[in-house]
Image (cartoon, rainbow, N blue to C red):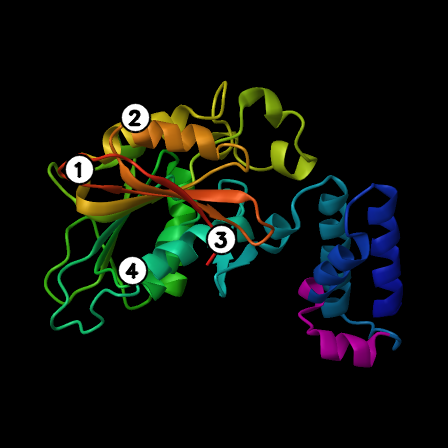
Amino acid sequence: MTLFRLLTEGTRALERAGTPNAKQDAQQLLLAAFHLDMVHFLLNRMQELEDSSQNHAATELYREMIGRRQRRCPLQQILGSQEFMGMLFFVNRHVLIPRQDTETLVEQVLADTADWEADAASQEERCLLDLCTGSGCIAVSLAARGRFSCVTATDISEEALEVARRNIGALLPEWRLSQEMPGKKEKCIRLFCGDLFAALQEEGERYDVITSNPPYIPTAVIGTLEPEVKDHEPILALDGEEDGLSYYRKIIANAGGYLKAGGRIYLEIGFDQGPAVCSLLEEAGYQDIRVHRDLPGKDRVVSARWLKEKGKSTIRREENV
């Protein structure tokens, strides 16, 4: 048996199952099972595999992974990881798989906060709240690349928060994971389990930025999604109820009580939800409402500013940063 024959075997099995990107997926699974990089695969793909317990185990693992992919289990769940903002996040069936669409939100926050004073000695405490954090991809990315001293993240799923904890430990070793607010010159990330703002333990806390990628798919649409999504990703992270706007209503109605004056909120949206979410923000008194497009040019993020004094709202559409 050679690596090339195993790749051909896996590719054909995935093609028969109607799996998208059959050859690419089979190749990634083969490399993972045998702990190979592409260079060594290309050099050794035509050589007979040594008859060893290690190769037998790797072959068995590869075929088991191919079987899971045939059943349309997402490749990222099989491999246990997904790249996001240049970092490798652990994922499993309890969290939504991080997607490139969501990088639009992170990049916009970074662009809007780029003028914050970088000197830690003179920087005031900057706080971020991430709702529906899931794997923690937004919270961790902004902690790693933004100028925040305290990051708070909530999720209704304790299983999802376990995934976030694992990613924090792997990707933010210099940050302290704690339930308490940080001391001076200390970076702290906090996780709370509960429904949106109800998860927060301290009253009166205010944040410079609130972010969220909430469930926004209408219930009736979920059944039409690809099997990888509807059958394997958590329904809690997908179902935005009847019109897909339920979580936006809850977040927008309450976020003003948790934002500092001039603080901003950033919400990932479905490509056709921009007008509805903008209207919700406008009705709630937010200002400087902007719609940001992703790389393909679709509406992907809505942001707005919360001010003490209400003024006339404006809505702008902007290209992705």
Alpha carbons under labels 3 and 1: distance apart: 37 Å
Looking at the rendered structure, the kind of residue marked 4 is Thr
Please report the residue visible at 73 percent of the width from the left and 79 percent of the height from the top: 39
Please report the residue visible at 32 percent of the width from the left and 26 percent of the height from the top: 250
- Indicate the quadrant containing the N terminus: top left, top right, bottom left or bottom right: bottom right
Q: Would you name the residue on which mark 1 appears?
A: 201
Alpha carbons under labels 3 and 4: distance apart: 17 Å
- Which mark is nearer the camera, 4 or 1? 4
> Where in the figure is residue 171, as x and y percent of width and height?
39, 64
Q: Would you name the residue on which mark 2 appears?
A: 283
- Secondary-structure class at tag 1: loop
- Secondary-structure class at tag 4: loop
**Circle on res. 301:** none
- Which mark is nearer the camera, 2 or 4? 2
Alpha carbons under labels 2 and 1: distance apart: 28 Å
User: With respect to residue 184, does 317 lie above or below?
Assistant: above
Please report the residue visible at 31 percent of the width from the left and 33 percent of the height from the top: 196
Please tell me which residue lies in front, 292 or 10.
292
Q: Earlier in the sequence, mark 4 or mark 1?
A: 4
Tell me whether circle 3 and circle 4 mark residues in contact (CB < 8 Å).
Answer: no
Alpha carbons under labels 3 and 2: distance apart: 24 Å
**Circle on res. 113:** 4
- The span picked out in magenta is 32-45
